[in-house]
Amino acid sequence: MPITILQPAPPPGYNPIDTRYGDNSDSDSDGGVDVEGDVSMGRATKRIRRSEDDAIVTPGEIITEDPQWMRGHGTYTTIEPPAIVSSVAGTLAKTNRLLSVRPLRARYTPEIGDLVVGRIVEVQSRRWRVDVGAALLAQLPLSAINLPGGIQRRRTETDELQIRTFFSEGELLVAEVQQLYGDGGAVLHTRSLKYGKLRNGLFMSVTGTGGGGGVVRARRQAFAMDIGGGAAADAEKIDVILGVNGFIWISKHIEGEGPAAETATTAITRVEESIGLNVYSSQNDEIPTATMREIARVRGVIEALVEHGLRVDEEMVVRGYQEAVELARGDGDGDETLYLGGARGRRLADALVGR
């Protein structure tokens, strides 16, 4: 029986003469790569490139072919044809004649002096490997921590054998970036009374290091919030640590530890008295129910800030907490209401931006 090969039929609604078909397509490409010998698609004019600010671009999308523009972060150039192409998915930003793309979601890039919150993921002979949300694990050398009791001496083999008594896998800590390697890896240190192991609190992570809201570098990343006027009458303060890497720690306030140690006037000769033997303890203290409720409220405020694209810093967190308390009282739900999603979260964001 003979076989008849029919010519493929065009898709319904396709008109090869109508050039608007390509312009109305949702595809970000120009109909395929133009290689030598390729069949022309019959398009009369080039598609207009994105020119407005805050436009969303995708990897491989041509931003412009105008030679007067210079490429910035998140872009690369091609030779044939000469063009600036996006290398990440994000928002397009212009600075004079410089084009750059801010990624919608990107890993943390360490900088010297950053305050970060991290988690121990590996213990080695003379150092710890810490996850700080960067592309590479950070390193915390044994020589870069305070010994219990504030003893100032060289680290010995005994310290190496007892390295897990200081930090072990899974524990959280707050530290400062001291050094950067050529490959972008960070070296941390905890040689301060305000750095060290974290306990008595709650951990959360936020995104938004690119085009959205998130933790920003500010004058103070660790601070104590006054909640004496809120629902907790027996808990006057809580500590908040906003890691530049997007990791956040909210905990019960303890005098002489955490942010409270930042303003403490401790002489060098009295460091031994300030660094107690329980500085590396993993045992949590008893936390009142009212304090835990206010810690959960602060977490809800930070989640609402990130959800609505607002920055997360000391000013916004304190103001947001005060507005959240007023919202709970104004709605007649009582101070124990902690929900800040949906319409209530939008009201909170509108109050913070003055809308």
Image (cartoon, rainbow, N blue to C red):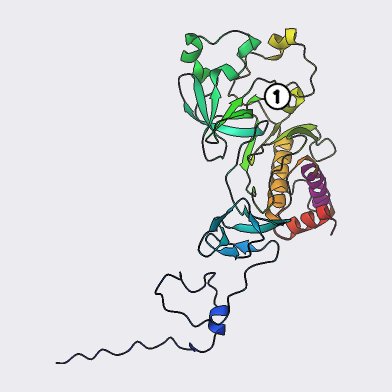
Q: Secondary structure at mark 1?
A: loop
Left or right of 347: which side holds 36? left
Quadrant (top left/top right/bottom left/bottom right) for the N terminus: bottom left
Q: Residue at x 62, y 73 (%)?
A: 48
Q: Residue at x 85, y 56 (%)?
A: 354
Up-down relation of residue 251 to residue 6 (above or below)? above
Q: How far across and how far down the image is residue 327, in percent?
A: 81, 52
Residue 270 falls in image quadrant: top right
Give neighbour class at mark 1: few <14, some 14-19, many 20+ (Cα, 10 Å).
some
Q: Is residue 58 magenta?
A: no
Left or right of 311: which side holds 118? left
Tally of numbered discs: 1
Q: Is residue 317 magenta?
A: yes
Q: How far across and how far down the image is residue 95, in percent?
A: 72, 54
Q: Is residue 24 visible?
A: no
Residue placed most toward the observer, 204 or 269: 269
Residue placed most toward the observer, 59 or 355: 59
Quadrant (top left/top right/bottom left/bottom right) for the C terminus: bottom right
The residue that label 1 is drawn on is 194
Q: How far across and how far down the image is residue 62, in percent?
A: 57, 64
Q: Residue at x 68, y 47 (%)?
A: 214
Up-down relation of residue 333 to residue 318 (above or below)? below
| Secondary structure mostly seen in the magenta stretch | helix
Q: Is residue 315 visible?
A: yes
Left or right of 15: which side holds 93? right
Residue placed most toward the observer, 335 or 279: 279
Up-down relation of residue 344 to residue 118 (above or below)? below
Residue 263 falls in image quadrant: top right
Magenta-tinted stretch: 316-329
Residue 286 falls in image quadrant: top right
Task: Name the amino acid type tagged 1.
Answer: Lys
